[in-house]
């Protein structure tokens, strides 16, 4: 009973950096397949922004202008923000809450998966879905809304929105660490819908009551919306740098909250 | 207590000299005020199948979680391959099948196996893993389209795909039909014969008996018996006698070999290690004895028998 624990003398092949990179790539690839085959995810994240855009940007408000740009272009930026937010909050938040709450995350943790690969994959996949949503909206705007943007502007718009999705991935992570597997979708909707309304993503911020205009700067979607609008040449509020700083600050706060949740989970097991 | 069991155990000296790959030393685990494990010491040796046998809530899963580094011990120590189970170099030598409520359902069986295989430096070929788990025909099915038993087999495949030196199987055969269970048993035996260490938890004595080199019986967070399947069976092969008798409970209890007596309706329920001497004595003492039924004791009774033995031993030592 006092013998020391002996390792079986088999040389352990440590994983090379190339192997680690393949694990990260695999993790992201299968995370993408997992979500792409989930109709509820595809429908709730892609269909809603597309539907709103078709209705308000392409069918109604034709030929009108908002903040010096055509409505079809303006709403491309705001529904693009709305879409990115949904893809990230549902993809990361609901996904994490379910996998954490129903034991799958533990199976992954018991495996030799590098823990960071799990979060990397979720972030990359949310960014990918964000890009898909933006590209669908841009295509619709070009084909049916008479939107004219230079290729550079399209790239800037897409890059801004996809980069901004990181903040909402962090928010999703915070939710995922505190929400239960069955309550997570409802909690995400309770945050997602009011937040996008109050940030001026459905109705332009200048058309909202002054109460919303006052609280909007405290809401991350407002900042990403303003950044997206500025890439297509619309009139915006505040400086771009300020908006990026606000998004970064929100992301850090959310990561801090997620960390508390992580520690709470660890405390349950590692206490 | 443990030392005492060891002295009486007949586990071959050959098996005792094999290297230990994982060990709990006086490990305790508290969840709030609940003591899930109390000073448990166990070791898993290379090439052996160790069964941790116990009823639900006995602490089996907790022991596995400590050894996997998924939970920290509240007291005592955990040692796997000479170090912390969370060390990535140890993780790539370990495989685990855990109880999980939900697995991503939109991925196909082959995709799940491919992803987990990719974590390991020297995984088995995916086709071999699928064949070993009996999943070759199901490789292109989505996880969500599988039956309960098929899902269990996928989790088994994920546990073995990396060709690990140490394998944990937590209630692996839960929900499997007889055929699938046999297939899994064969795989587990073949893994052990290749020098892998296997720790499996089960609440079926029969399963532990069929597979294990050594059985640890655990109840309420404590190890109550340890030994070869033959030894354990000898201690748990209790009989249950049901009868109508004029004797009082106290009188029946006084009969040598009776472990416990309960009243159930009009009849008495007697637990005994061996039925025949008790029956002979009952018939001698009560001419009106009737309605006699002798059945083998269920696991619950077997545990009771073990616990009783343990207490007796404890008093004796």
Image: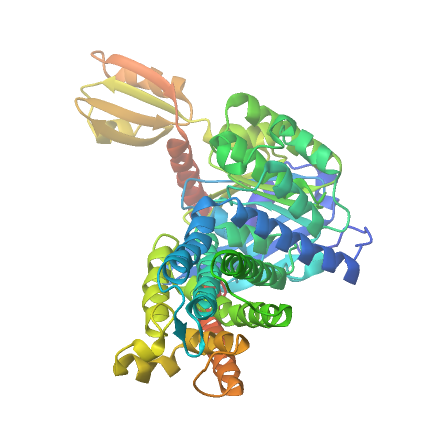
The residue at 48%/30% (across/down) is B147
**The quadrant where residue A163 appears:** bottom right
The residue at 50%/66% (across/down) is A169
Question: Height in image: B153 above or below A136?
Answer: above
Residue B198 appears in the figure = no
The residue at 44%/37% (across/down) is B306
Spot occupied by residue A250 in the image (x, y as percentages of width and height): 46, 78
Spot occupied by residue B224 in the image (x, y as percentages of width and height): 47, 44
Question: Height in image: A81 above or below A121?
Answer: below
Spot occupied by residue A82 in the image (x, y as percentages of width and height): 43, 65
Count how many numbered circles sit on residues in the image: 0
Closer-to-camera residue (B113/A226): A226
Spot occupied by residue B56 in the image (x, y as percentages of width and height): 41, 42
Closer-to-camera residue (B285/B163): B163
Colouring mode (rainbow / by chain / secondary structure / one colour): rainbow
User: Is residue A115 found left or right of B120 in the rendered image?
Assistant: left
For this orientation, the residue located farthest to the front is: A63
User: Is residue A210 found left or right of A41 in the rendered image?
Assistant: left
User: Is residue A128 found left or right of A80 in the rendered image?
Assistant: right
Residue B298 appears in the figure = yes
The residue at 52%/80% (across/down) is A248
Closer-to-camera residue (A41/A153): A153
């Amino acid at each position: 009973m006092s013998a020391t624990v002996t390792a079986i003398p088999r040389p352990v092949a440590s994983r090379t950096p190339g192997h680690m990179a393949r694990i990260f790539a695999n993790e992201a690839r299968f995370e993408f397949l997992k979500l792409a085959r989930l109709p509820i995810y595809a429908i709730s994240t892609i269909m809603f922004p597309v539907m709103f855009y078709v209705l308000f940007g392409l069918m109604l408000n034709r030929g009108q202008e908002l903040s010096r740009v055509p409505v079809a272009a303006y709403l491309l930026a705001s529904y693009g923000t709305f879409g990115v937010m949904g893809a990230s909050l549902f993809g990361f938040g609901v996904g994490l809450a379910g996998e954490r709450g129903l034991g799958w995350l533990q199976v992954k943790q018991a495996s030799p998966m590098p823990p960071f690969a799990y979060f990397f994959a979720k972030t990359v996949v949310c960014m990918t879905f964000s890009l898909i949503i933006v590209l669908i909206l841009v295509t619709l705007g070009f084909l049916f809304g008479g939107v004219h943007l230079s290729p550079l502007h399209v790239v800037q718009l897409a890059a801004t929105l996809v980069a901004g999705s990181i903040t909402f991935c962090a928010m999703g992570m915070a939710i995922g660490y505190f929400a239960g597997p069955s309550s997570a979708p409802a909690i995400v909707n309770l945050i997602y819908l009011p937040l996008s309304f109050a940030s001026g993503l459905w109705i332009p911020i200048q058309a909202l009551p002054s109460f919303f205009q006052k609280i909007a700067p405290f809401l991350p979607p407002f900042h990403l919306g303003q950044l997206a609008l500025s890439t297509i040449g619309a009139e915006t509020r505040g400086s771009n740098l300020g908006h990026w700083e606000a998004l970064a600050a929100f992301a850090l706060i959310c990561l801090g909250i997620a960390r508390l949740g992580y520690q709470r989970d660890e405390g349950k097991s590692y206490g | 207590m443990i030392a005492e069991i060891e002295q009486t155990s007949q586990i071959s000296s050959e098996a005792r000299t094999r290297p230990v790959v994982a060990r709990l030393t006086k490990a305790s685990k508290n969840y709030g005020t609940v003591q899930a494990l109390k000073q448990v010491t166990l070791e898993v040796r290379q090439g052996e199948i160790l069964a941790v046998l116990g009823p639900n809530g006995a602490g089996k899963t907790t022991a596995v979680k400590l050894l996997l580094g998924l939970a920290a011990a509240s007291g005592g120590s955990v040692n796997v391959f000479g170090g912390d189970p969370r060390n990535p170099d140890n993780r790539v030598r370990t495989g685990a099948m855990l109880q999980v409520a939900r697995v991503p359902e939109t991925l196909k069986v082959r995709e799940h196996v491919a992803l987990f295989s990719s974590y390991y430096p020297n995984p088995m070929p995916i086709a071999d893993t699928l064949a070993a788990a009996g999943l070759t025909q199901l490789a292109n099915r989505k996880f969500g389209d599988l039956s309960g038993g098929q899902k269990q087999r996928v989790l088994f495949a994920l546990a073995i795909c990396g060709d690990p030196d140490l394998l944990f199987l937590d209630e692996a055969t839960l929900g499997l039909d007889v055929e699938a269970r046999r297939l899994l048993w064969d795989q587990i035996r073949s893994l052990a014969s290749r020098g892998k260490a296997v720790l499996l938890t089960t609440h079926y004595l029969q399963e532990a008996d069929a597979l294990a080199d050594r059985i640890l019986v655990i109840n309420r967070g404590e190890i109550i018996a340890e030994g070869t399947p033959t030894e354990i069976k000898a201690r748990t092969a209790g009989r249950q006698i049901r009868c109508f008798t004029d004797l009082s409970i106290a009188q029946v209890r006084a009969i040598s070999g009776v472990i416990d007596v309960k009243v159930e309706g009009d009849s008495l329920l007697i637990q005994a290690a061996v039925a025949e001497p008790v029956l002979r004595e009952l018939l001698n003492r009560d001419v009106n004895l009737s309605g006699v039924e002798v059945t083998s004791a269920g696991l619950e009774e077997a545990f009771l028998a073990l616990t009783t033995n343990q207490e007796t031993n404890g008093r004796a030592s």
